[in-house]
Image (cartoon, grey):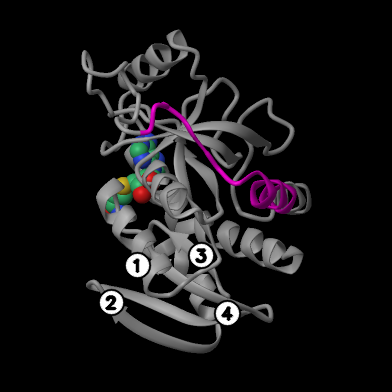
Amino acid sequence: MSTAILSALPEEQSSLVQHLAQPQRLMHAGRAFWRGELHGRPVVLALSGIGKVAAATTATALIERFNVARIVFTGVAGGVGDGVHRGDVVVAQDYVQHDMDASPLFPRWELPGYARTRLACDPVLTALLLEAARACVAGGSGQFGLKSAAGQARHRVHHGLVASGDRFVSAAAESQQLRAALQGAGHDVLAVEMEGAAVAQVCHDYGVPFAAVRTISDRADDTAHGDFALFVQTVASRYAEHMVQTLLRML
Ligand code: SAH
């Protein structure tokens, strides 16, 4: 059975497609899926699309149509936790939907019908992804054309809670508010993006292992849009390729 590698943006996927052996492109649900082998392992590459609904549809198709054994998400995210800088890598431990709010029927952020707020990623697959991310960051410092933030010796790998929602967070005030509100309820968020929690929920429903890694492209602040665009063009795809390659060798 194949491993699905899910990317949010074409820029993040491009170098994976270039390295695919026996590539086969299939259209399904208005999306392109690439079947083939990466480093000797059967894979299906797909774009999640942007936002939770698009990502949930892609994840469902990967499971129902392509019968994948596990889903690994690689993408970029805005850093919101202290010390989570551009170029750092966040491996998700679990996910929260920061825009889920069915209060007063359910506590804010709780997923109705799931009796919980956070959905955990698969611990075994996540431990491998964490190892792959650490190996890449340790070996790749300075290789990716991005200087570390001032005063920071090298890029770091973080592991913890990631928040998803249907918003590109691009104002410092919004990012601080989002983080403080969740922190007040005991949810310490490292990074924000737009798809992971949806894929985590689909994988939870089907019992399919899920792991996610996000490289920090911006700080979800007032310069987020420019930082994001530059990062995606220059760094994201090479980061994704290195981490996926290292992970697949471990499987
Ligand atoms: N491709 C579009 C916009 C992409 S939206 C463009 O042309 O600009 C941003 C993507 O990166 C989403 O897939 C999201 O998961 C992630 N992301 C990066 N920084 C983010 C932030 N600050 N807030 C929310 N999502 C972010």
* Residue holding disc 4: 19
Outermost residue, top side:
184
Depicted 167 relative to depicted 200: above or below: above
Whichever of callouts 4 and 1 sits on the residue coming sooner in the sequence is 4
Secondary element at tag 2? strand
* Residue holding disc 2: 28
Whichever of callouts 3 and 4 sits on the residue coming sooner in the sequence is 3
Of 191 and 43, nearer the camera is 43
Amino acid residing under circle 4 = His
Mark toward the viewer: 1 or 3: 1
Secondary element at tag 1? helix
User: How far, Cα to Cα, is label 4 from label 1?
Assistant: 23 Å
Mark toward the viewer: 3 or 4: 3
* Residue holding disc 3: 5
Question: In this rendering, would 174 be left or right of 147?
Answer: left
Whichever of callouts 2 and 4 sits on the residue coming sooner in the sequence is 4
User: How far, Cα to Cα, is label 2 from label 1?
Assistant: 8 Å
Amino acid residing under circle 1 = Ala
User: How far, Cα to Cα, is label 3 from label 4?
Assistant: 13 Å
Mark toward the viewer: 2 or 4: 2
Say which mark, if any, is on residue 61.
1
Give yes or no for contact between labels 2 and 1 (Cβ–Cβ under 8 Å). Answer: yes
Whichever of callouts 1 and 3 sits on the residue coming sooner in the sequence is 3
- Residue 180 on image: x %, y %: 41, 12
Secondary element at tag 3? strand
Whichever of callouts 2 and 1 sits on the residue coming sooner in the sequence is 2
What are the residue bounds of the magenta stretch? Answer: 114-133
Of 13 and 54, nearer the camera is 54
Q: How packed is label 4: few (under 14 Cα within 10 Å), some, or many (20 or more)?
A: some
